[in-house]
Image (cartoon, rainbow, N blue to C red):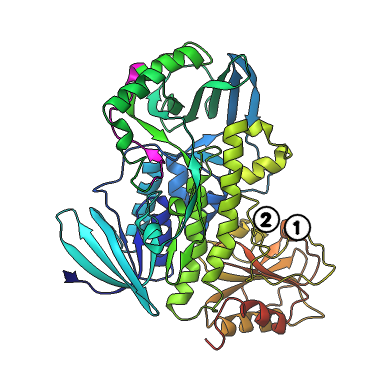
Amino acid sequence: MARSASTDVLIAGAGPVGLTLAAELRRSDVSCRIVDRLPARLPYAKAVGIQPRTLELFDRMGLVRDVLDAAVVMRGQLTYVNGAEQGRIELVLPPDVPYGFAALPQYETERVLEEFLGRFGTRIERSTELVAFAQDPVGVTSRLRSSSGGEEEVRSRFLVGCDGAHSVVRKALGLTFEGGAFPEEYMLADVEVGWGLPPGYGVRSMHRGEDGAVDDLLVCIPLPGQGRYRMSMLVPPELSAARQATGGAGGDGAGDDGVSHGLEGGAAPALADIQKVLDRLAPEPVTASALRWSSVFRISHRLVDRYGEGRVFVAGDAAHVHPPTGAQGMNTGVQDACNLAWKLALAVRDAAHPRLLPSYDGERHPVGEEVVGRTVRHAAEGVQADPTAPETLLLREAQLLVNYRQSPLVTPLPPGDEAALRPGDRAPDCGGLTGDIAAYPVRLFDLLRGRGHVLLVYGSHPAGDTPGDLAAAARELSRGRMETCRILPVDAPDEAAGVPHHHDSRGEFARQYGVEEGAAFVVRPDGYLSACLRLPTVGQLKEALGRVFAQGT
């Protein structure tokens, strides 16, 4: 067995989650290796929905333009029951949210992420799988095997399993994966249709029997290309029987671990099989053509008992699987990766507070639990049956309401402070920020892009410490890992020499952050607030940063 040089983080699995994690680590100058058992990315449009929150994270990383250039807009959904239109869902978000909903085939998402990762000199090691590992107090020793049968031993500080529903890392770590499977089989197909429905809208067409239960279903999601959709539908009994007779249920979707989730092997549905469903359920007569690929898949709903143990972690489908309702799975996994990456980056440099890495499970496990529960309900009852107000439901589907208010990393507000924006919340965007040199206003997200921890200081502080004192303390307490950006009211003088600043020319920052005069906000690398300080002092800032950074680093 060959022995390789060590690396900071070994990542098993090069789907969107593993690639996001690798890119975030490399942006932080953390060495990593990313391996995948497949020889090439799969040409399947599996996960296709890109949520607004994911686009915000891609913006922070610096690759959102590449994603937007490849994606198509998702404007809403048309719903039909027994051939009659039941209205439409319009995917319209508040004007302060910088991105809308998008659709992009998973292989394109992976391509964009892989090309971005390549800018840092890191490539996917394909046809290579993790077969075993052992951890000790200072690292992890892993055994990799190539498709030719050669083996290699890798030493890393940490190991992350982004290796899907049948995760080797999860099983070897002894994590439970409780849940169940839906009995139905579904067909997936990537086809073109020439109907007259408005572009940018998904289609959900159902047939209800006399008992009111749904007994036939067609879901179509637009993809890049003229009239191209990713369609999913129930497998008809005759095709299911034929597949079972030829062993079709034994593919990737049903592993020997009892988890039936994902694409299955066996004969794929033909264009004629897809056409039969369209003849029954399409809102108007239409002919499908240009079949790119098709498959059968099964759906499970499962969640690990914890997201890691010691120096080994799981993310994405390795930690949670659930129905594709609302396009939550891949997007939740991307947030897993962004949450974990910055914490690993500090831990690698021995700059992390002891509670930092355990907070990954504390923050992400409740999110996974909520997403699994919600998508199972929506799959059984439909999104329209959700009692949540439509505006709130849309924000939740966009993943803009995810928060970490209960995290030990956040600094609680003083008793009696009922501010709408609280520590643990997503740091909202705003526009109209003007500087002294550029003749055009910028967004707050423009100022945060590509940065790690950022201290946002608003206004002056007659009862607190000066912005200069706060900026100096932020640098010292983080050992140079935190930058400071000052936001001034529109009519404030430019007295903050040495601290970069912008004017809140339209008052949007003050409105979004609920401030009038004198405040500071600690923004984490994943775009969440860890502290909201009114009339801030260096002492308050020290307490807030002491929850994240190792003391004395």
Residue denoted by label 1: 507
Residue 98 part of the magenta-drawn span: no
Which quarter of the rendering shows the N terminus?
bottom left
Distance from the alpha carbon under mark 2 to that under mark 1:
8 Å
- Side of 256 relative to 521 (left or right): left
Q: Quadrant of residue 488?
A: bottom right
Name the amino acid type tagged 1. Answer: Gly
Are the residues tagged 2 and 1 within 8 Å (C-beta)? yes
- Side of 214 relative to 6 (left or right): right
Residue 146 visible at all: yes
Residue 263 part of the magenta-drawn span: yes
Residue 382 visible at all: no
Name the amino acid type tagged 2. Answer: Gly
Residue 432, numbered label: 2
Label 1 packing within 10 angstroms: few (<14), some (14-19), many (20+): some
Q: Which residues are magenta?
A: 258-272
Task: Give x and y (percent) for residue 235.
Answer: 41, 24
